[in-house]
């Protein structure tokens, strides 16, 4: 069985790295959004809500892919939901209890939005309308932290090869909002 958690995607069918591709798309859209807001403010920004939704979806796909490929059971025919797999991921990580709790609470909040976006309809409009840039920024930081933990766990096995870098943030760059952004 081919292991897909690698950071040098060749975009061939046998080596597709959807989790990294999704994170890269999130960073491209985030950086475009941040650049515009830093230069012009958020007033009159075209497709503002759609951009927040798209980036959130990219984060969700990236997280679902990376934990699904690394924390699902080979015995199960179906991949469990991201919320169940996230618990397996947290249990496998070597984080202190307070960081696990903080990450779990943030992920639970993220899932409210991600599930609303994946199951979009009138019943979900209020949830989507409450998605803010600050909330998205907290989801961005959470996504990067999850990636760093997965990579750290992946490095624990000497058979796994991974490029030398300190954080996924060294590979995928997200620009920061100015303080007034």
Image (cartoon, helix red, strand yellow):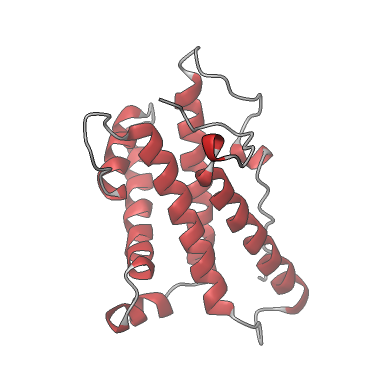
Most foreground residue, 114 or 132: 114
Residue 66: where, in percent of width, then height? Answer: 44, 40
| Left or right: residue 24 compared with residue 112 | right
- Quarter of the rendering containing residue 10: top right
Residue 142: where, in percent of width, then height? Answer: 47, 49
- At a point 66% along the width and 28% down the height, the residue shown is 165
- At a point 40% along the width and 25% down the height, the residue shown is 1
Q: Residue furthest top?
A: 158
Residue 152: where, in percent of width, then height? Answer: 50, 27
- At a point 59% along the width and 39% down the height, the residue shown is 12
Whether residue 13 is situated above or below residue 177 in the rendered picture: above
Whether residue 126 is situated above or below residue 20 in the rendered picture: below
Q: Is residue 121 visible?
A: yes
Q: Quadrant of the C terminus?
A: bottom right
Q: Residue furthest left?
A: 76
| Left or right: residue 147 compared with residue 109 | right
Most foreground residue, 100 or 17: 17
- Quarter of the rendering containing residue 178: bottom right
Residue 112: where, in percent of width, then height? Answer: 32, 64
- At a point 64% along the width and 83% down the height, the residue shown is 46
């Amino acid at each position: 069985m081919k292991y897909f958690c690698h950071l040098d995607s060749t975009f061939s069918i046998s080596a597709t790295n959807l989790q990294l591709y999704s994170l890269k798309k999130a960073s491209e859209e985030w950086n475009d959004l941040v650049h515009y807001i830093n230069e012009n403010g958020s007033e009159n920004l075209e497709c503002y809500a759609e951009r927040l939704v798209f980036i959130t979806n990219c984060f969700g796909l990236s997280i679902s892919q990376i934990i699904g490929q690394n924390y699902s059971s080979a015995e199960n025919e179906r991949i469990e939901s991201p919320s169940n797999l996230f618990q397996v991921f947290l249990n496998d990580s070597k984080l202190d209890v307070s960081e696990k709790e903080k990450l779990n609470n943030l992920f639970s909040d993220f899932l409210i939005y991600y599930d609303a976006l994946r199951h979009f309809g009138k019943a979900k409009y209020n949830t989507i309308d409450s998605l803010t840039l600050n909330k998205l920024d907290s989801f961005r930081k959470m996504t990067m932290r999850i990636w760093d933990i997965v990579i750290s766990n992946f490095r624990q096995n000497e058979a796994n090869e991974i490029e030398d870098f300190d954080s996924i943030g060294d590979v995928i760059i997200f620009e920061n909002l100015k303080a007034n952004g």
